[in-house]
Amino acid sequence: MVQADATSDIAAALSAGNTAWILTASALVLLMTPGLAFFYGGMVRGKTVLNMMMMSFISMGVVGVIWVLWGFPMAFGTDVGGFMGNPFDGFGLGNMMTTDGSAPLTNMAFVAFQATFAIITVALISGAIADRTKFGAWVAFTGIWITLVYFPVAHWVWAAEGWIYRLGAIDFAGGTVVHINAGIAGLALALVIGKRKGWGKDPMRPHNLPFVMLGAGLLWFGWFGFNAGSALAADNTASVVWVNTMAATCAAMLGWLITEKIRDGKATSLGAASGVVAGLVAITPACSSVSPVGAVVLGLVAGVVCALAVGLKWKLGFDDSLDVVGVHLVGGLTGTLLIGLLATSAAPAGVDGLFYGGGLRQLGIQAAAAFAVLGYSLVLTLIIGFAIRLTRGFRVPDEVESTGVDLAIHGETAYEALGTGRVAQEVKA
């Protein structure tokens, strides 16, 4: 009896400790969305900074409510053919409020943690369509996209019954679910909405680089919850993931800055911030499967590749305003595929990639997962985007875009001097 009581006490303590860590990690990840608002807000021109930041903030409001009502059961509820969870199984989370006291983690802690992932994934997309988007259209897109695209993909990859999970693909914290998914959706919306007025001709420089660096710092801080929290326990896996996340991000920043210096002759603050985010993106799927040295290699590759990739929009002619494609899509693909090369069975995931004698099997699995998510998100986002464009319109009028959407849509400006002129036209959100 004494031994049984001791075992029960240990289990309860583990549950309490793990729950405390996951709730802390959830708060860290939630902070990433306001951090993203600063990161994106600083990168746009001063006349649209509030609209850009509001696109991140409203994602919290819309997705947070949907997650409670039908989002969590769609992602993690009773399986429907390996495609999604049943949205009516646990509608409103009424079945999640109690848990077994011996469980390693309370149900609601997992609900809270996963909610923050859904929120920031939608917010990431907004960077591709800065300066020209109706706020109401974005709100409508947020609710539709999270339901039709994000929830099914999360189920495929992270639910035990999901087909990508059963395939054996490794995506520890969201390389496919979050970054490839958001990156390709950003490209799709940029194509649907079209280029900014004056793109390629007029200067469209970041208006506040300190905002950008502050946002990058908040993202880096919160990302330790994003990745290490995905261990769902305060254990050795979380510790390994934390170190790998730090190492890859540092290396990616250096890789980006070296590339800038060689290519442009300058190492910029925007490059440092972008390199940080590129490294965070790339290590996200791989943080449990590589060694710390592997994380450095992965981060360095991601920094260089993403720094080069952001220039593709000029060659291919699509206006990805804030480099969502170059950083999140390319970074997500880089990290997901490099698992097939750099994974080592000495890491918590316990899988060997090609460079550790594992052959090409894992690389093939990673590629199948990455491109399945890419294809699904691309097609569905194009359909949703065109539907909104044809029904209520996605883009503000040219004169409002020229003057700035902050005053026309939100009735306010970030800087008082910008509010002295007369806006040509008010736009219904």
Image (cartoon, helix red, strand yellow):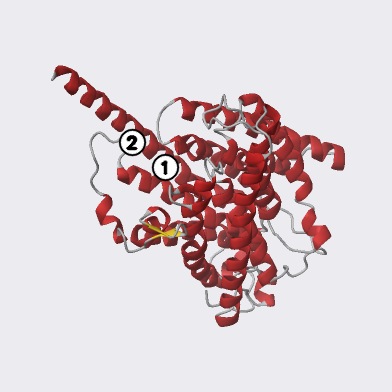
Q: Residue furthest left?
A: 1
The residue at which mark 1 appears reads as 26
Residue at point 52%, 60% (across, down): 54
| Badge number at residue 56 | none
Query: Taking 146 as reference, is 181 left or right?
Result: right
Task: Determine the image quadrant of residue 298.
Answer: top right
Q: In which quarter of the image is the N terminus?
A: top left
Residue at point 68%, 54% (across, down): 325
In the image, residue 262 above or below residue 140: above
Give the spatial CA distance, label 2 vs label 1: 10 Å
Secondary structure under tag 2 reads helix
Residue at point 57%, 62% (across, down): 51
- Residue 222's x, y, as percent? 50, 39
The residue at which mark 2 appears reads as 19
Secondary structure under tag 1 reads helix
Residue 1 visible somewhere in the drawing: yes
Q: What residue type is labelled 1?
A: Ser
Q: Which of marks 2 and 1 is in front?
A: 2
Q: Which of marks 2 and 1 is nearer the N terminus?
A: 2
